[in-house]
Amino acid sequence: MKTRQEAREYLRQYKDITRKAEEISRQIEYITEEAYNLKSMDMTSDRVQSSPKTYDRIGEMIGRIDAETERLVDKYNKELETRREVVATIFQIKNGKARSIIFNRYIDGFTWDQTVSAQDISLRWAHVLEERGLDEVAEIIS
């Protein structure tokens, strides 16, 4: 069986994946913009009858940009699938209060103060519920 620490690390993936997905999204946006810039370049005034290689190079660059965009989209989708798995794991926690504590802490990113305020419980009880929730997550991911 997995430990509580391993369960914490599993749940912390959510935040890490969120940051990675945002970075990938920015990269896709940048690459897409670069592709549009290349596609919209007017090379007709620079073209000389004997140099069709200019168009070949642009086509090759656009092809590489498209391939990189596709790779990033695949990576983005895999990251989102892992996020969905983490959330699905949390929803398998049987104790509703423990599930809420885990969700607040690891998905919503609440501090302990925010968590106890949202749940209207003591800090000590919140820690007990988190431990119970982590034990269930450890069992689920084993």
Image (cartoon, grey):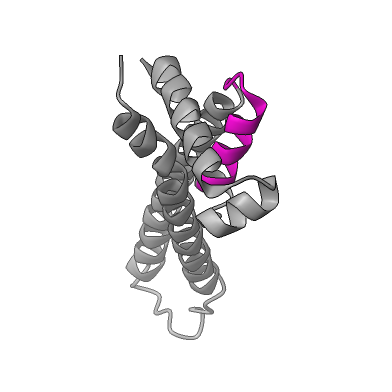
Left or right of residue 128: residue 93: right
Q: How many marks?
A: 0
Instruction: Please report the residue visible at 43 percent of the width from the left and 79 percent of the height from the top.
Output: 47
Image coordinates for residue 98, horizontal then vertical, percent = 58, 31
* Residue 98 drawn above or below residue 138: below
Q: Quadrant of residue 142 in the image? A: top left
Left or right of residue 69: residue 61: left
Image coordinates for residue 110, horizontal then vertical, percent = 56, 55
From which residue to which does the magenta span run? Answer: 92-105
* Residue 42 drawn above or below residue 55: below
Q: Magenta span: helix, strand or loop, mainly?
A: helix
Left or right of residue 38: residue 100: right
Residue, far bottom: 45
On the question of residue 137 being in view, the answer is: yes
Nearest the camera: 126 or 30?
126
Instruction: Please report the residue visible at 39 percent of the width from the left and 51 percent of the height from the top.
Output: 68
Q: Find out whether residue 102 is within the magenta segment.
A: yes
Q: Find out whether residue 3 is within the magenta segment.
A: no
Image coordinates for residue 109, horizontal then vertical, percent = 53, 53
Quarter of the rendering occupied by the N terminus: top left
Instruction: Please report the residue visible at 58 percent of the width from the left and 40 percent of the height from the top.
Output: 101
On the question of residue 81 being in view, the answer is: no
Nearest the camera: 73 or 48?
73
Nearest the camera: 61 or 55?
61
Q: Quadrant of residue 103 in the image? A: top right
Image coordinates for residue 94, horizontal then vertical, percent = 61, 18
Nearest the camera: 90 or 95?
95
